[in-house]
Image (cartoon, rainbow, N blue to C red):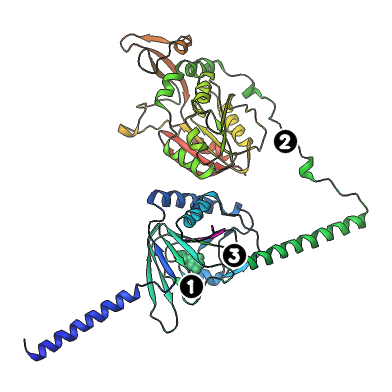
Amino acid sequence: MSHQQRRACIAAGAAAAAALLYWYRRRQPPEGATLLEAVLDEEECETLETLLRDLLRNGSSLPGKTYSPVTAPAFKKRNQSRETLQFGAYVDKNRVQNAAVAPLPPALLRVARRLKKLGVVQSVPDACCVNFYGQGQWLPDHVDSKKFERPLVTVSLGSEQCVVFRRRGYLARRIRLPVGSALRLGGDAANDWTHGLPPATRPRISLTFRRLNAETKRHFADETKAIKERRDAKKALKRQQRNKPPKPSVRAERRPEAAPLPSEATDKTPSIELEHVRSVYNAIAPQWHGTRYKAWPRVAKFCLMNCGAGALVADVGCGNGKMADAACRRGAFTIACDTSDALIDIAHTTHKDKRYECLVADGVRLPYRSGAFDVALNIAVLHHLSTAERRVQCIRETLRILKPGGRALFYAWAKEQKNGSENRSGHQFDSTDVLVPFHLREHGPHYNKETARQCPAHAVRDERKNATVLKRYCHVFAEGELRGLVAGAARVDECYYDEGNWAVACTKL
Ligand SMILES: O=C(O)CCC(=O)C(=O)O
Ligand SMILES: [Fe+2]
């Protein structure tokens, strides 16, 4: 190699090393910033994302200023018009304000507690700003308000993105934010460097967890108190002027609304339901229980998202209580009912260790007062009601017992059944009102002579299968039918096909 060639080689090597060093330094987080990967696993991210998108869809019904569409024309023009949900504290254009917002919902509180447990923060954050970025939306460079304590922690969901840190006189830093990661910003990174996000290439959600500092909290509390005092004083003055005694509080006067009086649709159970639903379930209860002991995964997910600690859940038509684990898992109290006393006996024995009560009652006339429950489950019940009037009545009853804002999930067997392994029950339906055979085996671990002896009159022996054949009445639902019935009585949030059923999740308005 000539001298000249050697010099060229060295120069190229030095340039490559400098480029590598530059590349490396660009990716080093500034002092005070730490990235923790996999703080949430894939399933947790997915569950949280579904929950948050659900909340966003219902954004306008959340309290106060929790939801902001951020549609200021200038923001929209610059593509910064992302939607936000703010819990615990309200920020507008990076300025903290004293406005009413909802506290952290249980799912976010769990993440906040996890951050403390992992040592990312010292106190559990009590505020969270959830940013929903659509494709192309970005966040300009900023320093988070000093009214928030340090560190701030941002958890990423949905898709990977980069955050760019800038500081005058320093090389800009570009840090990858994988899904499920938490970026902790303290010290210089939070106070002296700005951070911003380039346009998102795919939809993304970020959760910025933080705490207002004590001084701001105190200031806001004083301000709120002063406003209330001024308002009360004004009211008192007006009252004095009118010289009227103060009105008693409406809340104290209000009596719980009683269950409605029975109507034609509810006061008499049609004989087809007595013979082909109630009696059948009473006879097959032990065998039924032997193979059905867990909520379907999507029903369990609904429970996970909606049945938090302290919530009151109604399981309308609970069968053997297979929803109990999912409904009570996060500390909710469940009151379940079914018309089959044999199934209620099983539900009671199986779940007596839980915050769970069950009783014999009919879904078309629930023995609960109106507005009492936070969540209602009505799973695989409606298709056993034999008139349209009774199905509507059962939906109305399920919603009646919910508080405004309460959520309900309905599942009803679909007329449209898939082929192959996706159709676990193996049934196909030609008409909407059908009698579906059930083979009650007279052998095996779940055979119970006692209940089998109480078979309804229509039961017939199948000697070949050594079983008694009972027929269950079902009205199978055509696509759109369930949605149509629920939409008349509540706001439909989601409608889907699952486990051979049509499903509708809704909110009582
Ligand atoms: O979306 C992100 O990752 C950052 C959000 C952020 O900086 C903020 O909410 O202040
Ligand atoms: Fe920020």
Q: Amino acid at mark 2?
A: Pro
Please name the residue shown 51% across and 37% down the image: 327
Asked if residue 81 can be seen in this view, the reply is no
Marked residue nearer the N-terminal end (2 or 3): 3
Real-space Cα distance between discs 2 and 3?
A: 39 Å
Q: Which residue is mark 1?
A: 187
Disc 3 packing (10 Å; few <14; some 14–19; many ≥20): many
Tell me the SS state at disc 3.
loop
| Left or right of 448 in this view: 331 | right
Cβ–Cβ under 8 Å for marks 1 and 2 = no
Please name the residue shown 40% across and 14% down the image: 469
Disc 2 packing (10 Å; few <14; some 14–19; many ≥20): few
Q: Is residue 124 magenta?
A: yes
In this rendered view, identify the residue nearer to me: 197 or 294: 294
Q: Which residue is mark 2?
A: 256
Q: Amino acid at mark 1?
A: Gly
Between tags 1 and 2, which lies in front?
1
Please state the horizontal and vertical placement of residue 328, each as a whole percent of the image.
52, 37
Q: Is residue 153 above or below residue 294?
A: below
Q: Amino acid at mark 3?
A: Leu
| Left or right of 216 in this view: 166 | left
Between tags 3 and 1, which lies in front?
1
Q: Which residue is mark 3?
A: 212
Tell me the SS state at disc 2.
loop
Please state the horizontal and vertical placement of residue 296, each as a whole percent of the image.
43, 35
Please state the horizontal and vertical placement of residue 56, each as a whole percent of the image.
53, 54
Q: Is residue 117 above or below residue 397?
A: below
> Disc count in the image?
3
Marked residue nearer the N-terminal end (3 or 1): 1
Question: In this picture, which residue range is highlighted in magenta?
Answer: 122-132
